[in-house]
Image (spheres, rainbow, N blue to C red):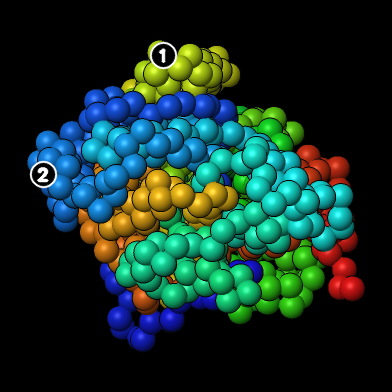
Amino acid sequence: MRQSPLPVSQPGSIPEEHAARAAGPSGGASVPGRGHASRRLCQGGRLLAAASTLTLAAAATAACSAGGAGSASATGCAAYQAYQGHKGATVTISSSLTGTEAERFEASVAEFESCTGINVEHTGTTELRSQLLNGSGANLSTSSGASPSSQDNPENLPDLAIVPQPAMVAELVDTGVVHPLPNKVNSNVEAGWDRHWIQVGIHASVPYGAPLMVSLKSLVWYSPDAFKKAGYEVPGTWADLEALTSKVRSDHPDGSVTPWCVGAADGESTGWVLTDWLEDALLATQGSGAYETWASHRSPVDSPSAVEALGAVNSLVLDNGRVAGGRGSVISRTPVQAGADLVKGSCLMLHASSSFESRFPEGTVITDADGANPVTVQAPRPTASATAADGTAGATASAKDAASTASATGTAGTAGTKVSAFVTPAADRGSDSVLVGTDYLVAFTRSDAVSAVMEYLTSQEWARTRMALGGVATANQSVDPDLAPSDVGRRATRLLQSRQTTVEMDASDSMPVGVGSSALWVGLSRWATGTVTPEEALKQAESAWPKQK
């Protein structure tokens, strides 16, 4: 179920931003922001302006004009001619996108709605898997995952879903409720994506999932200004990262500033932050060979290589005085709170994906390694989360999330604080391997309107429009990386589009869901608090692996 790596580069041909992995930010998802919101997208272009949560005037212009992105103001509705004939139809989409990420997704289809007359209703939820599986009518009590659905046409499913884990796509396909991708959608995907990305959505030789968005997970966020003031340099190797961590610790013996910010609390998904740490550490310290062996389960989840990687994370991040709030706070603090800690300066490094730029506090400035090319983060806008007429929970949820973050951190963010990101340094300075996550589009119903929405979401026009709104990276070859508003997003996209990069799919996302998105999360959460050893945590996940019949 995991994605095969992209071809390794020839000597001397690695792009500058990758050859010097730590010389500057190489930015770049996947587990999307969580929360809950349900909203009907506004008609017309006003949502595009209202929902953008960075100061993206220039980016919005690029989305409207560059590469045929299809703005009504620039080209009328000519770009949407292929999707006409379905006025008044409603297409529902469920995802785990919430807050700013949901708003940007909604903004990316607002003009499509206005020009086609198709109403797109998007619901973001923290319980996507359980809602989809319950809606499918499948038997969820089997040891190997969901069994085939007992319903021919389940009525409690959306028309479409954006699924953040390949294993979830496979599980849904096994229930029998997912429809194969339409031919036009397949053509769109094949025109923009390399085969390696496409294969993840293919099951039993049938394409069911279309790649939409990608996040680069091998990233460490930091403040260029804080590093410069303290005389710290971006590390070039894993050993350099260890030395930097020790230096920050020794420079602040009172614990007022710690090297690392970590927040793994995320409702029923608590622990995914820790799986990202495990996977990236294994890849960085032992290379693609060891990672692929473990990710494909050719070696068990509790193999010596995984135990060693978890030990490396423990000594780097969780030892005394190395994480904000202490080890015990890791599973009580959320990723958003950890991001706020970085902005406040109470900790200096945060391991998080490229998409995390949309989750920093209001006023945070995303820059390059020199603190230049700024893009400012704004708070989620409740008016973009739901229309007043709908009265949905989206606006309330966004407002509550913002208030909760401000209360928990004592601030809504330090306005003007600059953050950037560097690629997680490997033990081998010449390594070109990175960890990624991908969102896939799947369909539960068939209709001409549903097909039209799918065709648009897999088109070059949508990919470019979504990129220009910020907060995502892509491996879609039709998208100009310069459309990304932030330097981190541009670097991430160049890295992901390069066939010289060895891309490794997030292993836990591709494991059986009961393992990678359940037992491993729980086991690592217990390990983080010191309740179990690394061996015990990983053995718990290995024991959950479905047994061969």
* Residue nearest the observer in this picture, 41 or 352: 41
Q: Amino acid at mark 1?
A: Ala
Please provide percent x and percent y for residue 43: 29, 28
* Residue nearest the observer in this picture, 68 or 516: 68
Please provide percent x and percent y for residue 71: 17, 41
Figure quadrant of residue 459: bottom left
Q: Residue under label 2, please give it.
A: 75
Please provide percent x and percent y for residue 332: 69, 30
Q: Amino acid at mark 2?
A: Thr
Is 387 left or right of 484, judged from the image as shown?
right
Query: In the structure shown, which secondary structural element does the residue marked by tag 1 occupy?
Result: loop
Figure quadrant of residue 357: top left
Q: Is residue 457 above or below residue 389?
A: below
For image coordinates 81% across by 49% down, the residue present is 140
Can you see residue 22? no
Cα distance in 3D space between marks 1 and 2? 30 Å
